Image (cartoon, rainbow, N blue to C red):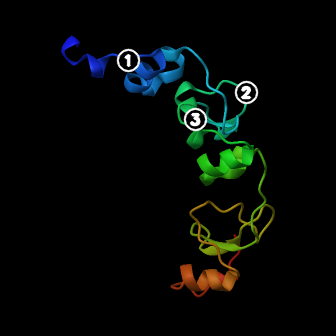
Amino acid sequence: MLSNHKFFLSNTREDCCKKFYEWDYYSSCVGTTPALTHGEFYPEWSSTTSTCLNDGNIPTYMLNDQRWYLSTTLRQCCERHFYFNINACLGTSYGGTDKWYVQYEAMTCVQDCVGVSPCGGVANDWDELFSSKEKCCEEKMFYDNKCRFRTA
């Protein structure tokens, strides 16, 4: 260490922390908490729900990269980190788009909505949606002429 002291020694604690402890700069090395420059909402991945919190308990590693992890609004945080399940993150219910998707178990196309038939429930993110039942049957159930006439 002494043979290469210019590399290993620093003039300030902050310089040393930036050089050797960047991954844990604030909590363990410098012993301070940085100012929040990009909001207070952060993704909460340790729970069973996909959501963002602003409870002041931001994990240290997120403080080190605020531009990526922190957001000024709940919507921004949900759109960035939970885009695949944004309604659950926002805590809102979603009634569907009223478009059509195939329900292979029923061998027909159903509407993306909640309620009685022709609604088949809210479509999954991976379900391809169509503007009409006829279009859905033509594209997804082309081998079955009775698709348009079946109900779920």
What's the CA distance linking mark 2 and mark 1?
36 Å
User: Does residue 122 appear left or right of residue 63 in this picture?
Assistant: right
Q: Residues within 10 Å of mark 3 (few under 14, many from 20)?
A: few
Residue 26 appears at what percent x and percent y?
A: 53, 21
The residue that mark 1 highlights is 10
Residue at image coords 76%, 71%: 98
Of residue 101 and residue 51, the one placed in the foreground of this image is: 51
The residue that mark 3 highlights is 45
Which label was assigned to residue 55? 2
Q: Residues within 10 Å of mark 2 (few under 14, many from 20)?
A: few
Residue at image coords 63%, 27%: 58
Looking at the rendering, which quadrant does residue 53 occupy?
Answer: top right
Q: Earlier in the sequence, mark 2 or mark 3?
A: 3
Residue 111 appears at what percent x and percent y?
A: 72, 71
Residue 19 appears at what percent x and percent y?
A: 38, 26
Quarter of the picture holding the C terminus: bottom right
Q: Earlier in the sequence, mark 2 or mark 1?
A: 1
* Vertical position of residue 140 compared to residue 4: above or below: below
Kind of residue at badge 2? Asp
Kind of residue at badge 3? Trp
Residues under numbered marks 1 and 3 in contact, where contact means CB atoms less than 8 Å apart: no
* Vertical position of residue 89 compared to residue 83: above or below: above
Kind of residue at badge 1? Ser
Number of numbered discs present? 3
Residues under numbered marks 2 and 3 in contact, where contact means CB atoms less than 8 Å apart: no
Q: Residues within 10 Å of mark 1 (few under 14, many from 20)?
A: few
* Vertical position of residue 119 compared to residue 45: above or below: below
What's the CA distance linking mark 1 and mark 3?
36 Å
What's the CA distance linking mark 2 and mark 3?
14 Å
